[in-house]
Image: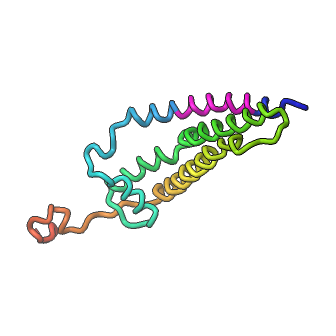
Amino acid sequence: MTPLYGILAIVSFSLIWVAAAAAFAFTTRVRRRAHVTATLGIGVATAAVRRVGKRAPMTADELHLARQVLNDRGSLLALAIPATLFFLGCFYVFGSLEELHGRTPSERTFLGVFPMITATNMGLQVLRSARLKRRARGMEPTDPPDDLADGGATGVSSARQ
């Protein structure tokens, strides 16, 4: 019998460290940036991303915020986080199969499938953000209405003053 599962476990273990190093680099890069919601209200970033998905008109500030959030979420390095979790699940499954030495596997052997399914979902969410990033790139900001441009205090258009 060839040690196929042992080799796959070793490869998975190596890929865990490669993906974890890339995930560390990605999170370090994102954490160095100023926090988006520090100056804005809670939920503003999520609302801006939803408006991109609906192709709703957005102001320049909203579009800038949505592009910044989608650039982070849709980055190729963002896939390293679910990849780390996926390879961790693979390592658990292959390592368990190697330890069985040909005996019948139990349910415990396949517990590593749960992180693999979770990582697949996370990866699909990153790919969805990448699709929205392309959509946001083609959007143009809209100007606010004239009565809001002067703060709405006078209620008179700035062109008439």
Quarter holding residue 107: top right
Please tell me which residue is depicted at 33% across the width and 63% down the height of the picture.
142
Residue sitting at 63 percent across and 41 percent down? 86
Q: How is the image coloured?
A: rainbow
Comparing 44 with 107, the one in front is 107
Write the residue at 25% across / 45% down: 39
Q: Is residue 41 magenta?
A: no
The picture quadrant where one finds residue 51 is bottom left
| Residue 150: quadrant of the picture | bottom left
- Magenta highlight range: 9-23
The answer to whether residue 155 is left or right of residue 122 is: left
88 vs 45, left or right, is right
Q: Position of residue 132 (x, y in %)?
A: 50, 57
Taking the magenta stretch, the answer to whether it contains residue 13 is yes
Residue 5 position, x and y percent, is 79, 34
Q: Nearer the viewer, residue 22 or 154?
A: 22
